[in-house]
Amino acid sequence: MKEYYQLATQHNLKKIREEKKITQDAIGYACGQNGSEISRYEQGKSMPGYWILLGIAKFLEAVANLIVGVLRGLLLV
């Protein structure tokens, strides 16, 4: 199940970020991270912690559950 959440997070985070035309650096700055850490989330090399995920969701004006794929149970297409 962890693999699903990681796959959904990396895919959905990148999709939402690109749709809003926001850089990884901008998200990182807003969340106290750096752009390379956001890149790691999008590549599936790392998963954001709870508070970081909430910060990312707030910055992207998205629901955290949507980023990790819980609401739809599927990847965003």
Image (tube, rainbow, N blue to C red):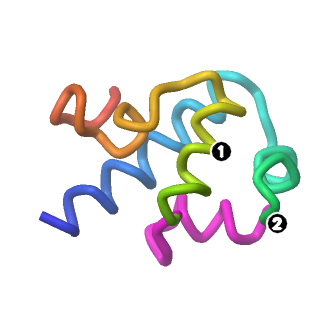
What amino acid type should be assigned to the residue bearing mark 1?
Gly
User: In front: 65, or 5?
Assistant: 65
Mark 2 or mark 1: which comes first in sequence?
A: 2
Farthest residue, direction left = 1
Q: Is residue 42 magenta?
A: yes
Question: For the point 24% across and 28% down, which residue is it?
Answer: 71
Q: In this view, does 3 lie above or below 57?
A: below
Question: For the point 54% across and 58% down, which residue is it?
Answer: 42
Q: Is residue 39 left or right of residue 4?
A: right
- The stretch of residues the image draws in magenta is 34-48
Q: Where is residue 31 in the image (x, y as percent from the top left)?
A: 76, 52
Q: Does the magenta stretch include residue 24?
A: no
Q: Position of residue 4 (x, y in %)?
A: 20, 58
Farthest residue, direction bottom = 45
| Mark identifier at residue 34 | 2
Q: In this view, does 33 lie to the left or right of 65?
A: right
Circle nearer the viewer, 2 or 1: 1
